[in-house]
Each structure stands twice: as structure tokens, then as C-alpha cells.
Amino acid sequence: MKLPKTDIIFLVILITTGLFLTILIYFPRNSAGTYVEIRVDGEKTAAYSLSADHRETLHTASGENTIIIRDGAVSMSDADCPDKVCVSMRRISRSGETIVCLPHKLVLEIRSSGSETSPLDAVTGGAP
């Protein structure tokens, strides 16, 4: 069975588009000017640049969480909360992405130093 020429062209375009999107999503990004903001119970407690590798243990009134910044992304490597959902969350590196530990009221959010509010805040008028 021979495929028509238009089907072959369509498949090549489809595969090329898929590869391009994969590279866009997974290609390492420049993290200069990007940082992780740490909030406990709604209050900003710290911020760390994603451009330098770093390990930090965060102490809250509810417990401890350990974060690791490596290769321009941050992850929660350990927590003493009962469910450890935050530890199983994937690494984050893009502005607006978050990791949340509900038992400890801890939020890690990626921010870009070029903008104070997210596009959603500008549209909805909400506070950052």
C-alpha cells in the first residue's frame, strides 16, 4: 500500500511540529532574572534566584520543608508533613508555576524580576 503524496507531506509537517513543541517545552531555559518566591501563611519570607544552585531547609510553625534549586528549576525534596504531596510535585521553572504544601501553609512560586504581577492579575484586577 502506497501513501499519497499529500498524506506524506501531512505526516512530515505533523512530526516536525511535534518535535518543535517538544523542544520548546523541554529545552533548558535561561533563568537569569527569574526567582522563586517563598510565602508562609500568605507572607513573603524569602526569595532565591534560579540562576545559582542552592539547597535550603524552610522552617515554619507547622514543620520543615527542604527545597532544591538546580539547573534553573526548583523542587521540594523533603517535608515532614503527613501526606508529602508537595514532595511528589514536579520541578517548576516558569513564571507563575507553584508548589504548595497545604499542611505547612507554604507556597513556592516562580516569579520573573521583569514583572510584578501576572497577566491574570492585570486582566482580573486581582492583587499579586
Image: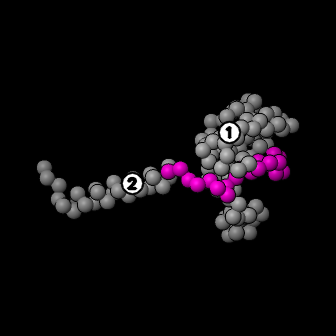
- Which residues are the magenta region? 27-47
Residue denoted by label 1? 68
Pointer 1: residues within 10 angstroms few (<14), some, or many (20+)? Answer: some
Q: Residue furthest right?
A: 61
Tell me where residue 115 sits by quadrant: bottom right
Residue 94 in the image: state x and y as whole percent: 61, 53
Percent of width and height locating residue 12 = 29, 57
Crowd around label 2: few <14 · some 14–19 · many ≥20 (10 Å): few
- Quarter residue 58 falls in: top right
- Residue at 25 percent across and 60 percent down: it is 9
Q: Amino acid at mark 1?
A: Ile
Pick out the residue farthest to the left. Answer: 1
- Residue under label 2, please give it: 18
Taking 118 as reference, is 40 above or below it?
above
Furthest residue toward front = 52
Disc with the residue nearer the chain's start (2 vs 1)? 2
- Of 13 and 7, which appears nearest the observer? 13
Observer-side mark, 2 or 1, equals 1
